[in-house]
Image (cartoon, rainbow, N blue to C red):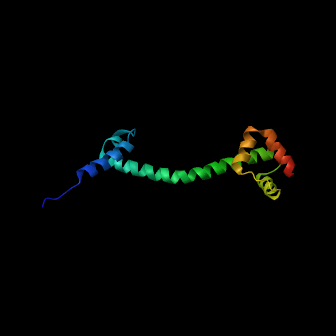
Amino acid sequence: MPRSVNSVASRARRKKVMKQAKGYFGRRKNVWTVAKNAVEKAMLYAYRDRRNKKRTFRSLWITRINAGARIHGMSYSQFMGKVKSNGIELNRKVLADLAMNHPDAFKAIVERVK
């Protein structure tokens, strides 16, 4: 009995990877072995950075809240401690947006927690 190699599936698998490598520079877009490695590494970066994005945004929000709080004479840690103790249920994302885009509303929150 002849050996069966499912070339349809093999070709489909390669096509899928080559399609993902579209737009890459040089041999990364049209040489199978190079493209496979490039796509694999890109997928690892994508997986890792979906998690890192959350850290980065949290750090940005903290920076913005800190800047907004210091304008009104408080540090970030003092401000957040008082926000929690006063039972204000606003997360860092919303507080950072208020500090950046709605300074009057942020000032009202600071006055309430002082």
Residue furthest out toward the left: 1
Give me the residue at 76% from left, 53% from top.
89
Q: Using residue 2 as the reference point, say whether residue 104 is left or right of it.
A: right
- In this view of the protein, which residue sits in the foreground, 76 or 3? 3
Give me the residue at 73% from left, 38% from top.
101
The image quarter in which residue 18 lies: top left
Give me the residue at 75% from left, 42% from top.
99
The N terminus sits in image quarter:
bottom left
In this orientation, does residue 71 appear? no
Number of numbered discs visible in the structure rendering: 0
Percent position of residue 65, x then y: 74, 47
Percent position of residue 75, x then y: 79, 51
Q: Using residue 68 as the reference point, say whether residue 49 is left or right of it.
A: left
Give me the residue at 82% from left, 47% from top.
109
In this orientation, does residue 52 appear? yes
- In this view of the protein, which residue sits in the foreground, 95 or 9? 9
Residue furthest out toward the front: 1
Percent position of residue 35, x then y: 35, 46
The image quarter in which residue 26 lies: top left
Compared to 66, does 22 lie above or below? above
